[in-house]
Image (cartoon, rainbow, N blue to C red):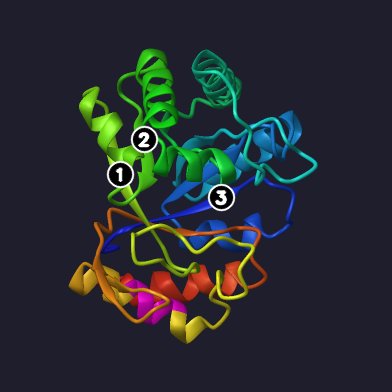
């Protein structure tokens, strides 16, 4: 069995979903706003069903041009509706295949804004709870995303990242910085094992901070995503 949930952002048109799916336990499936479409969602859900991987919605800003990684400052109600619409899209497709949707994980800029902004975090959590209070919200460990969701009585799963570096405040290093990504398999596995075994992560400045490793994320669009997921799966698997 796995020591921790391994999740990956899927259905984004990268072409490696088949190689990654056997080594993860949760799939965050793009809902068409930053990537994917109805055909892709159908294929990805069926692939997850084949490998008994939990299915979750991966809502984002409507920003296909920038892959959902550009901040947009919307009204609270707009964020609420944006998230609910995408959950509904994936839910309807999953239902056709008799797959129960398990969780919701915001994507890109929406995720990062939710982590640091109370208002955004609350709007997303409210949208998830009002749609289905049984859904689990994935959010950055120690962030407003988790705190606001828990405050509403929503189930949460604190997320840590295998392939990203951390700042001293627990946030992810912005992708605009050269050291944002970890591209070495050995370093990725070492970071994961540190987070799982010690509940800590070493930041880019060398400080050690506490994390809650409820679920471990690998970005499906990374150049080494398939290699990373296999290595992490092997490192965390206990017979």
25 or 186, which lies in front? 186
Q: Position of residue 66 (x, y in %)?
A: 75, 45
Between the residue at mark 1 and the residue at mark 3, the CA separation in whole angstroms equals 15 Å
Seen in the picture, residue 188 relative to 64 is either above or below; the reply is: below
Asked if the magenta segment contains residue 191, the reply would be yes
- Is the residue marked by circle 3 packed among few (<14), some (14-19), or many (20+) residues within 10 Å? many
Question: Viewer-proximal residue, 7 or 107?
Answer: 107
In three-dimensional space, the C-alpha distance between marks 1 and 2, rounded to whole angstroms, equals: 6 Å
Identify the residue at the far right of this view.
65
* In this rendering, position of residue 55 left or right of residue 45: left
Query: Tags 1 and 2 in contact by the CB under 8 Å rule?
Result: yes
Q: Quadrant of residue 119?
A: top left
Q: Residue at x 74, y 49 (%)?
A: 13
Numbered mark located on residue 9 in the image: 3
Q: Is residue 147 left or right of residue 161?
A: left
The quarter of the picture where residue 237 lies is: bottom left
Q: Position of residue 187 (x, y in %)?
A: 45, 83
Q: Quadrant of the C terminus?
A: bottom left
Which stretch appears magenta? 188-192
State which quarter of the image contains the N terminus: bottom left
Residue at 60% of width from left, 48% of height from top?
10
Q: Which residue is mark 2?
A: 137
For label 1, the residue is 157
């Amino acid at each position: 069995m796995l020591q921790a949930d391994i999740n990956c952002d899927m259905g984004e048109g990268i072409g490696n979903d088949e190689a990654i799916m056997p080594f993860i336990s949760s799939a965050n499936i793009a809902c068409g706003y930053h990537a994917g479409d109805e055909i892709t969602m159908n294929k990805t859900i069926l692939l997850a069903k084949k490998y008994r991987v939990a299915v979750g919605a991966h809502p984002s800003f409507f920003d296909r041009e920038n892959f959902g990684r550009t901040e947009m400052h919307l009204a609270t109600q707009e964020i609420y509706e944006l998230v609910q619409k995408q959950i509904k899209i994936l839910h309807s497709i999953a239902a056709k295949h008799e797959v129960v949707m398990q969780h919701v994980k915001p994507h890109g800029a929406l995720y990062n804004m939710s982590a640091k902004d109370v208002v955004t975090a609350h709007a997303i959590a409210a949208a998830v709870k009002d749609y289905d209070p049984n859904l689990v919200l994935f959010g950055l460990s120690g962030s407003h995303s988790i705190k606001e969701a828990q405050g509403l009585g929503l189930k949460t799963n604190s997320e840590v990242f295998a392939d990203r570096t951390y700042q001293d405040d627990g946030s992810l290093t912005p992708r605009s910085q050269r050291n944002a990504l970890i591209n070495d398999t050995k370093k990725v596995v070492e970071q994961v094992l540190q987070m799982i075994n010690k509940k800590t992560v070493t930041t880019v400045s060398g400080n050690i901070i506490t994390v809650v490793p409820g679920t471990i994320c690998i970005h499906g669009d990374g150049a080494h995503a398939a290699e990373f997921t296999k290595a992490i799966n092997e490192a965390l698997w206990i017979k």
